[in-house]
């Protein structure tokens, strides 16, 4: 089985996160995808709602597709690095192929991640194109590891969690961007400025 690990802050998870996963599955690149929300200890993220809320919203979003799962592996009391996440899943799925899903914006800097070169040498990647990135230039940088990188036909849209958070705060309609049940969860739990600061 080919299993995709889809990391991110998912703050909140939105329809593009779901569409990208389903397209990777429907294009027969993967058989299963596991969303792995980043823990709130992540140094570059200081606007995250709680780990539990982001985990719950992902569970709500994927409720109708048995090919999708959510893992709380990175929701620990310390920052978890990508190499640890991949080692963890490789240890669970010993007989399966593990792929790390990321955008071209992140691929451009994988070599700067902790043990980044080892990651490139020893893991498979599925890349989601961002229209603003020069993918050929990025792939040329990693020519030595090209056999480990699969470029998908899936592309990102301009939907972003930042845009959605701003719209929610401003009481604008966001149902074009997020699942209605996820939105109801946000309202019920007064996330992202709902019901005042």
Image (spheres, helix red, strand yellow):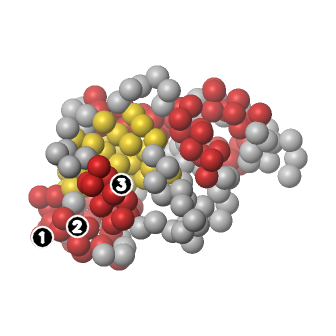
Residue 135 screen position, x and y as percent: 27, 59
- Label 3 belongs to which residue? 102
- Label 2 belongs to which residue? 120
Q: Are marks 1 and 2 in contact (CB under 8 Å)?
A: yes
Q: Is residue 148 visible?
A: yes
Q: As drawn, which residue projects farthest toward the right?
A: 196
Q: Secondary structure at mark 3?
A: strand
For disc 1, the neighbor class at 10 Å (few under 14, some 14 to 19, many from 20) is few
Residue 47 screen position, x and y as percent: 67, 60
Q: Is residue 154 above or below residue 46?
A: above
In terms of depth relative to the viewer, which is nearer, 5 or 161? 5
- Label 1 belongs to which residue? 144
Q: Is residue 127 visible?
A: no
Q: Is residue 29 above or below residue 109?
A: above
Side of 148 where 110 appears, left or right: right
Q: Is residue 7 above or below residue 110?
A: above
Q: As drawn, which residue projects farthest toward the top?
A: 64
Q: Secondary structure at mark 1?
A: helix
Q: Quadrant of residue 24?
A: top left
- Kindly identify the residue that appears in the image at 40 percent across and 57 percent down: 132
């Amino acid at each position: 089985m080919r299993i995709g690990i889809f990391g991110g802050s998912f703050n909140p998870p939105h329809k593009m996160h779901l569409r990208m996963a389903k397209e990777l599955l429907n294009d027969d690149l993967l058989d299963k995808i596991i969303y792995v929300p980043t823990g709130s200890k992540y140094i570059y993220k200081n606007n995250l709602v709680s780990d539990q809320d982001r985990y719950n919203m992902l569970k709500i979003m994927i409720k109708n597709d048995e090919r999708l799962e959510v893992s709380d592996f990175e929701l620990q009391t310390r920052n978890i690095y990508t190499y640890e996440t991949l080692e963890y899943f490789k240890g669970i799925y010993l007989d399966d192929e593990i792929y790390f899903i990321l955008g071209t914006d992140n691929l451009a800097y994988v070599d700067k991640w902790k043990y980044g070169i080892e990651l490139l040498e020893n893991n498979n990647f599925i890349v989601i194109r961002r229209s603003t990135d020069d993918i050929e230039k990025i792939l040329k940088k990693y020519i030595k590891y090209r056999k480990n990188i699969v470029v998908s036909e899936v592309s990102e849209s301009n939907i972003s969690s930042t845009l959605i958070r701003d719209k929610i705060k401003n009481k604008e309609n966001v149902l074009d961007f997020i699942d209605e049940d996820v939105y109801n969860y946000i309202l019920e739990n007064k996330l992202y400025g709902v019901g005042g600061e």
